[in-house]
Amino acid sequence: WHLSRALPFTDDGAIVKWFGTNTDIDEQKQLARQKDDFLGIASHELKTPVTSVKAYAQVLGAMLTQEGEDKKAGMVMKMDAQLNRLTNLIGDLLDVTKINSGKILFNKTWFDVNAVVQDVVQDIQHTTNRHILVMDFEEAGQVYSDKERIGQVLTNLITNAIKYSPHANRVVIGTRREEDSVIVTVQDFGIGIPKEKLEKVFEQFYRVGGSNQHTFPGLGLGLYISNEIIRREGGKMWVESEEEKGSVFCFSLPVIKDVVTEN
Ligand code: ADP
């Protein structure tokens, strides 16, 4: 049946019915679903062997260190770092399929925003010598949200801030309270984003320099995932930026003011 593009006419030439649009949309939806299914299955299948190789690399690294084979242990540690990158990429692909199929789950608890931001900042600071992460905190309050997911969003924003500021060495992470929201900001002094591209950076697979942007590796998924997480947690994400000057990525989360605690 190839009715989809057929146009049945009456004798005087009027169109009786137009089948095209709906069918084309159905086809597009099916293709998008197939793409998501494929991404989901492929990333799931990739995850298991990578996890296993990573476990062997860690054991091997520890053995070599114990035997005083520092050079070899150093090489295995580099392998381990690359495996971390691979694990993160696979994790992003899995998250995208979960988001697009509406299957992303949130494990909500009460937590203090400043405590989580501080933990994430300290973790990332340990991985970089070149950049100083400056904390500029105000009393922000408690939110009811998924701690891990909010940590993931922050990690994305801070690692981007570092990645896209090759010639600056400072990133400022701030928190503040604004009415019924807590606002978290990540400011860098890096390459910035052209005005006309600002809204696009939250689209999946979008990268300002295109996919051939060799200088800065990435899939163009981190901001899409981050924005979707914040949106689904009742907040908003936005960016202000100027080329060659730097960017400020911000997100808000609703704060529940009067928490009634039972004694
Ligand atoms: P990735 O970094 O893997 O490409 P993201 O979704 O995190 O994917 O970001 C999308 C794009 O937005 C990036 O490719 C980059 O062009 C731009 N971008 C993100 N963060 C920054 C930043 N802090 N400074 C400048 N450009 C940025």
Image: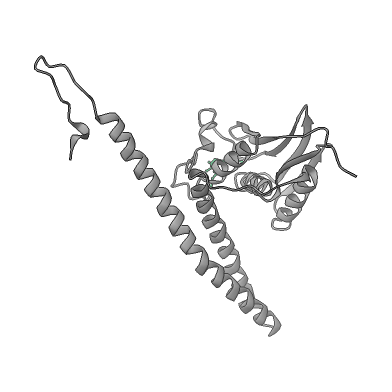
* Viewer-side residue, 203 vs 192: 203
For the rendered model, the colour scheme is one colour
Residue 41's place in the image compared with 236, above or below, is below
Residue sitting at x 12%, y 19%: 10
Residue sitting at x 34%, y 39%: 28
Q: Is residue 15 left or right of residue 50?
A: left
Q: Is residue 191 left or right of residue 172?
A: left
Q: Position of residue 98 (x, y in %)?
A: 52, 49
Farthest residue, direction left? 11
Q: Is residue 86 left or right of residue 67?
A: left
* Viewer-side residue, 148 vs 82: 148
Q: Quadrant of ligand 1?
A: top right
Farthest residue, direction bottom? 67
Residue sitting at x 60%, y 64%: 81
* Viewer-side residue, 87 vs 7: 7
Give the image quarter of residue 82. bottom right
In the rendered image, the quadrant that contains the C terminus is top right
Q: Position of residue 75 (x, y in %)?
A: 59, 73
Residue sitting at x 60%, y 44%: 164
Give the image quarter of residue 235. top right
Q: Position of residue 126 (x, y in %)?
A: 73, 58
Farthest residue, direction top? 12
Farthest residue, direction front? 263
Q: Position of residue 185 (x, y in %)?
A: 71, 37
In the rendered image, the quadrant that contains the N terminus is top left
